[in-house]
Image (cartoon, rainbow, N blue to C red):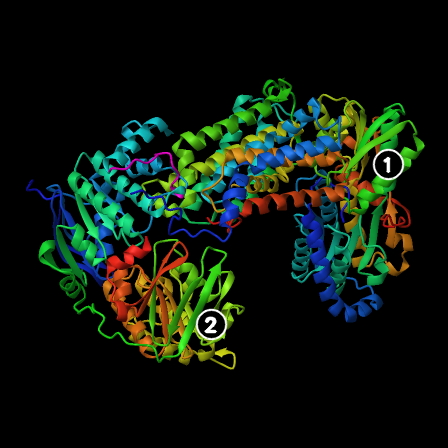
């Protein structure tokens, strides 16, 4: 094993204005090593990554790549030196081909190689090079395919190939940074990625950034924990577990096991779905929800979970079957009317459907419940503010600034605002949540889970679509498993105590 | 384990998933060409003996010359997600300059090729100024090129002076008008420009980066594309096309007049939209715009040829446009938004 | 709606005209209800030269007629020793209106030589000028059913021109040059304009007198040279081999048409209206254009100011004017090869002054023409 680390950070400091984002950060990434980086949102992870990618420069502190001191001037420079980043948001150009995107990643030093001369592109060479890059990470994809036609997982593979590509031409072992690569992947796709990471380890080093602690534990050799801009811990992966990591990251204990399962036989029925079929492919879905219950829908993509929720909410066309909320049939009602009956929906695409970007936090919260904050048709600002302050406290929304433009909050905090919007309503009977914890850091997940649990204790019935099976098992009283638009299993957790394997079996 | 899922996330597909795949994706790509064929057939039937004659086809192609040159420039600009409203002004300024420098009725100049080159340089300069101001002062292209349009017209007006300068026959001017295979050299130049544009689109960084920047300027920048440089180059190309079109237009009219480009902006933009290049950028291409130009030219020609009352011609023209745009717009929701 | 010109009027000017009417009518009818009564009854106020500002309106700078008009206006300004403000509407009625208003805002009394963009613009401008104690003379177009007398002495006079005579003259010249036999195509101006309608009516009159000539087809080219070029290309294609002559409602369109004919290698005779330099040169050299009609922008630009100035200074008592002098038709001149020399040379200051000396209403030939809007 080579002694020179692939990457070494020593005493990195970075501030934006008066805000210190990174303080005295030191890290070491060895050759052929997979190092995990975890931390809550706001801990400084993204700034650190941007720094490594060359998009920011540190205020002080040193950076060594393969033993040589470097100052990363810009993204191209970082790429030249072998650092490739696979971002959380897609950074591929969708109307270009796979090969072009990979070629573009190479930046300056590439053009001296064949591929382009005098501004003209040599497709044969570009495609051949792309195929080579893809093969290196074990992919057999047509380099001429348009990104727009690829699935998210496929695009991610291309991004990895792109990131690896840069190292190739730096004539150095690549350092690939994977930023939250699994947050939108299916279990099968995650397995594939795991294979990729192994391959990457053989040809270079990997920095694996993720909120999914179980994955970090599975894929990495060592883990760095970042909190409030400082490295608070470094551990060998095999000598640490999830609880410890969570505690290091947040300073809190995580609630893992569901102790408080109850019997809801006596409670009122809030939601009754009978033999629901839709134009979109749902087939005879039946489920029941009682007040205070949390019901989780699980299924692979296109299994129909989302359609069920949308049908209940009122934006999917029903071909047969019935939906009743608190005993009232709602099939014919508009969305607005259903909301009046106490229903609320938090979609997964929160940016497009859950929040109004142009408005402030307070305004967003007040939106769904104009009655509560309007007196005689006019906005009552102090009511709005009271409401939003209360919810900001309950959900630990950061920053605690009702006037902040919602677009500036982190994803997790936006999610909390969207949730608060609905939880504000005293009339709330049924809460529909579509993957509510997706993309949130563990600390945020805990706050939201707490809020949801409290809502249940207050008598709200909650129907969620679960992102992971663990989440379903942790929260739900009942689990309905969907596959290809039909129910394959209806499980009462209290009675049946299912395991992950049991449920997985019904999903595929 | 194969990754065969159809749904790429995080993009959301609109409600018309089914229609998109079977009707409008192919409609977008070939729709204009098909519409062209249908229109051509329709007019032939309405006017047997006068529409589909060699003479009229030549007329149509000659009428498409100036618009074709303009649309190749404009397509690249629109691919970026921007727009260039200045083309009529550039045409006028370059056209009158060309006339004043060639053999004419007013002064003793007789620069042949040099006049053409200077006119093209004027177009390049207009494009350069537009590109630089757009990039460094961050002025949106819509309002900026609107201003450049008036500057162009103003320049042309000053050059116009007291009266129209007539072009006298001279080797270069005659060359523009002489024919090869029955079609004027101007037309062949337009064909050449179009072919050049095709090559640029597919085989050069200039073209590919135009698409890339139109798709997402931020991502392109992060990927290392020198966005400012390529955007400026696109505007320069557009300016040069407008200048060339202005020269050819002036040669056709036989004089240097400020109105040489009148109506061309509307015609060109309509063709770009009808052809299926999205105003939001990143999608479309010169081939589609070319078919659209032919479609619109055939439409204009056919309407006059069929003796349609002039007061109805405009309305009919408009109807065809709306139908074409609706077909194109089924593909994506925010087609007609000009973004950058 | 305006007449003659070799500028392109787009649907936009029509639309702005409509907006102008709407705004003007609402605003002015509210204000004008009261004011109109006063104005119609008011005395003709007179002012010393020192209080006067001459205003002359044009629509675009790149148009022969307009430039001639400006030359005439400048000549008068020089003669009277008064400042001259040029209002260029740039084909926008609102622009024209607001620029005239800003001229009035200078505190001086304006003498406006108004060439309206659209006939509907006239009453609004006239009332506005009247309220400010100014004077206006309009030409070419005004709305049917309204006369200067309706507004008062401020609207001194309206100068109309006989478009029918123009169209008839040029058409006749064309048919003669064609030997009385053959096919022609015709290009109208902006369909909506009185001038275009009058001229085309003149063409039709001439056609009736020449049975050997057939009108193959007609279209509109909106006074625009470029549009005329394209339309002619298609018309020549449509009537291939049959076109011997081209009649157009303006020189600008004629020039575009003959360029198209030349490109197509078709020999034609052509006529236009306006008498711009290029057309005159073509007539002189025996070129495709055989005749045109001289609108004499120089004269109109000058005399309108002269009449207005005379009223403003009291030299002319508006109440003593004949009806035709307040609303009449003025002569223009047919130009053929024989007479072209007279018009080729642009008049200079001296010759313009000579024309002025002949009297303010020297070229008045009669009362207003019957409306072409049936």
Task: Identify the image quadrant of the N terminus of chain A.
Answer: top left
Tell me if residue B46 is in the magenta stretch: no
Q: Position of residue A79 (x, y in %)?
A: 24, 41
Give the magenta-colored segment's residue range: A138-148
Residue underneath mark 2: A324
The tag on residue C203 is: 1
Placement of C141 over or under B102, stated as above or below? below
Q: Are circles 2 and 1 on residues that touch, CB within 8 Å?
A: no
Is residue B242 rendered to the left or right of residue A469?
A: right
Judge whether residue A247 can be spotted in this image: yes
Q: Position of residue A490 (x, y in %)?
A: 34, 64
Give the quadrant of residue A343.
Answer: bottom left
Judge whether residue A53 can be spotted in this image: no
Give the quadrant of residue A415.
Answer: bottom left
Instruction: Specify the subunit that label 1 lies on.
Output: C
Furthest residue to the bottom? A376
């Amino acid at each position: 094993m080579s002694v020179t680390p692939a990457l070494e950070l020593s005493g990195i400091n970075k501030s934006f204005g008066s805000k210190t984002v990174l303080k005295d950060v030191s890290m070491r990434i060895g050759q052929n090593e997979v190092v995990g980086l975890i931390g809550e949102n706001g801990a400084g992870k993204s700034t650190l990554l941007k720094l490594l990618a060359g998009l920011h420069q540190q205020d002080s502190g040193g950076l060594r790549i393969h033993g040589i001191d470097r100052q990363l001037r810009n993204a191209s420079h970082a790429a030249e030196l072998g650092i490739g980043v696979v971002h959380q948001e897609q950074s591929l150009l969708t109307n270009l081909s796979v090969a072009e995107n990979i070629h573009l990643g190479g930046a300056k030093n590439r053009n001296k190689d064949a591929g382009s001369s005098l501004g003209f592109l040599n497709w044969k060479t570009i495609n051949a090079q792309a195929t080579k890059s893809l093969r290196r990470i074990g992919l057999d994809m047509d380099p001429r395919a348009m990104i727009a036609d690829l699935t998210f997982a496929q695009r991610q593979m291309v991004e990895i190939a792109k990131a690896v590509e840069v190292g190739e031409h730096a004539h150095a072992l690549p350092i690939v940074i994977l930023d939250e690569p699994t947050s939108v992947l299916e279990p099968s796709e995650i397995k594939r990625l795991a294979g990729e990471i192994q391959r990457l380890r053989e040809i270079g080093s990997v920095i694996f950034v993720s909120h999914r602690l179980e994955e970090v534990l599975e894929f990495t050799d060592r883990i760095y924990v970042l909190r409030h801009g400082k490295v608070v811990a470094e551990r060998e992966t095999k000598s640490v577990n999830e609880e410890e990591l969570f505690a290091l990251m947040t300073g809190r204990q995580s609630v893992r096991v569901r102790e408080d399962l109850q019997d809801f036989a006596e409670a009122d029925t809030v939601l009754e779905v009978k033999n629901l079929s839709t134009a979109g492919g749902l087939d005879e879905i039946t489920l029941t929800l009682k007040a205070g219950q949390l019901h989780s829908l699980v299924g692979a993509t296109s299994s129909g979970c989302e359609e069920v929720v949308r049908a209940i909410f009122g934006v999917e066309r029903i071909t047969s079957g019935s939906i009743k909320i608190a005993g009232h049939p709602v099939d014919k009602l508009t969305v607005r009317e259903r909301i009046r009956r106490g229903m609320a929906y938090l979609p997964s695409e929160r940016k497009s459907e859950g929040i109004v970007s142009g408005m402030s936090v307070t305004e967003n919260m007040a939106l769904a419940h104009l009655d509560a904050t309007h007196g005689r048709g006019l906005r009552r600002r102090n009511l709005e503010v009271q409401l939003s302050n209360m919810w900001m406290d309950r959900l630990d929304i950061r920053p605690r600034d009702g006037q902040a433009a919602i677009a500036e909050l982190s994803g997790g905090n936006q999610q909390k605002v969207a949730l608060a919007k609905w939880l504000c309503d005293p009339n709330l009977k049924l809460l529909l949540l579509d993957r509510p914890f997706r993309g949130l850091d563990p600390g945020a997940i805990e706050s939201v889970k707490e809020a949801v649990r409290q809502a249940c204790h207050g008598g709200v019935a909650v129907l969620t679509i679960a992102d992971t099976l663990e989440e379903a098992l942790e929260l739900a009283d009942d689990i309905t498993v969907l596959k290809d638009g039909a129910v394959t299993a209806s499980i009462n957790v209290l009675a049946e105590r299912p395991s992950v394997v049991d449920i997985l079996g019904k999903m595929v | 384990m194969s990754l065969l899922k159809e749904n790429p996330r995080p993009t959301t597909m609109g409600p018309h998933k089914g229609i998109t795949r079977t009707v409008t994706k192919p409609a977008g790509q070939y729709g204009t060409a098909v519409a062209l064929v249908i229109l051509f057939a329709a007019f032939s039937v309405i006017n047997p003996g006068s529409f589909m004659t060699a003479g009229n086809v030549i007329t149509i192609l000659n009428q498409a010359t100036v618009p074709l040159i303009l649309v190749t420039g404009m397509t690249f600009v629109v691919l970026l997600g921007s727009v260039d409203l200045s083309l009529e002004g550039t045409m006028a300024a370059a056209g009158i300059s060309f006339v004043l420098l060639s053999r004419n009725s007013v002064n003793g100049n007789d620069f042949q090729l040099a006049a053409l080159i200077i006119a093209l340089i004027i177009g390049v300069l207009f494009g350069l100024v537009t590109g630089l101001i757009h990039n460094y002062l961050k002025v949106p292209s819509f309002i900026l090129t609107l201003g450049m349009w008036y500057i162009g017209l103003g320049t042309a007006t000053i050059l116009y002076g007291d009266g129209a300068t007539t072009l006298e026959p001279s080797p270069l001017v005659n060359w523009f008008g002489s024919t090869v295979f029955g079609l004027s050299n101007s037309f062949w130049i337009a064909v050449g420009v179009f072919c050049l544009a095709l090559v640029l689109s597919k085989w050069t960084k200039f073209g590919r980066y135009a698409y890339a920047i139109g798709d997402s300027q931020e991502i392109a920048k992060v990927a290392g594309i020198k966005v400012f440089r390529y955007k400026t180059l696109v505007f320069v190309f557009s300016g040069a096309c407008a200048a060339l079109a202005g020269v050819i237009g002036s040669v056709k009219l036989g004089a240097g007049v400020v109105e040489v480009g009148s109506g061309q902006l509307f015609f060109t933009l309509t063709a770009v939209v009808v052809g299926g290049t999205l105003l939001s950028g990143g999608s479309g291409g010169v081939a589609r715009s070319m078919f659209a130009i032919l479609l619109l030219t055939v439409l204009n020609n056919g309407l006059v040829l069929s003796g349609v009352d002039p007061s109805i011609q405009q309305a009919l023209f408009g109807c065809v446009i709306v139908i074409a745009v609706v077909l194109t717009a089924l593909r994506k929701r925010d087609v007609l938004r000009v973004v950058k | 709606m305006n007449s003659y010109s070799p500028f392109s009027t787009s649907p936009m000017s029509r639309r702005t005209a409509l907006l102008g009417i709407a705004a003007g009518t609402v605003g002015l009818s509210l204000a004008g209800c009261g004011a109109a009564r006063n104005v119609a009854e008011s005395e003709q106020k007179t002012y010393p030269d020192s209080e006067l500002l001459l205003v002359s309106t044009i629509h675009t700078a790149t148009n022969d007629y307009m430039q001639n008009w400006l030359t005439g206006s400048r000549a008068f300004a020089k003669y009277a020793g008064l400042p001259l403000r040029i209002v260029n509407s740039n084909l926008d009625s609102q622009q024209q209106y607001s620029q005239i208003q800003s001229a009035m805002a200078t505190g001086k009394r304006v003498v406006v030589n108004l060439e309206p963009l659209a006939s509907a613009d006239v009453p609004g401008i006239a009332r506005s000028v009247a309220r400010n104690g100014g004077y206006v003379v309009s030409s070419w177009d005004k709305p049917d059913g309204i006369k200067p007398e309706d507004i008062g002495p401020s609207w001194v006079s309206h100068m109309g021109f006989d478009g029918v005579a123009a169209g008839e003259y040029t058409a006749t010249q064309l048919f003669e040059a064609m030997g009385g036999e053959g096919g022609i195509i015709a290009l109208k101006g902006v369909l909506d304009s009185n001038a275009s309608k009058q001229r085309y009516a003149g063409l039709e009159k001439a056609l009736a007198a020449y049975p050997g000539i057939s009108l193959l087809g007609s279209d509109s080219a909106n006074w625009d040279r470029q549009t005329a070029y394209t339309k002619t290309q298609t018309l020549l294609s449509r009537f291939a081999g049959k076109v011997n002559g081209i009649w157009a409602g303006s020189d600008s369109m004629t020039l575009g048409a003959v360029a198209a004919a030349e490109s197509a290698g078709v020999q034609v005779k052509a006529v236009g209206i306006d008498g711009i330099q290029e057309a005159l040169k073509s007539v002189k050299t025996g070129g495709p254009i055989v005749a045109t009609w001289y609108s004499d922008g120089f004269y109109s630009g000058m005399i309108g100011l002269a009449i207005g100035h005379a009223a403003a200074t009291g030299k002319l008592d508006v109440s003593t004017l004949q009806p035709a002098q307040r609303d009449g038709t003025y002569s223009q001149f047919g130009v053929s090869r024989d007479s072209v020399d007279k018009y080729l040379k642009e008049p200079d200051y001296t010759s313009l002054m000579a024309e002025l000396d002949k009297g303010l209403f020297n070229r008045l030939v009669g009362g207003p023409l019957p409306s072409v809007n049936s």
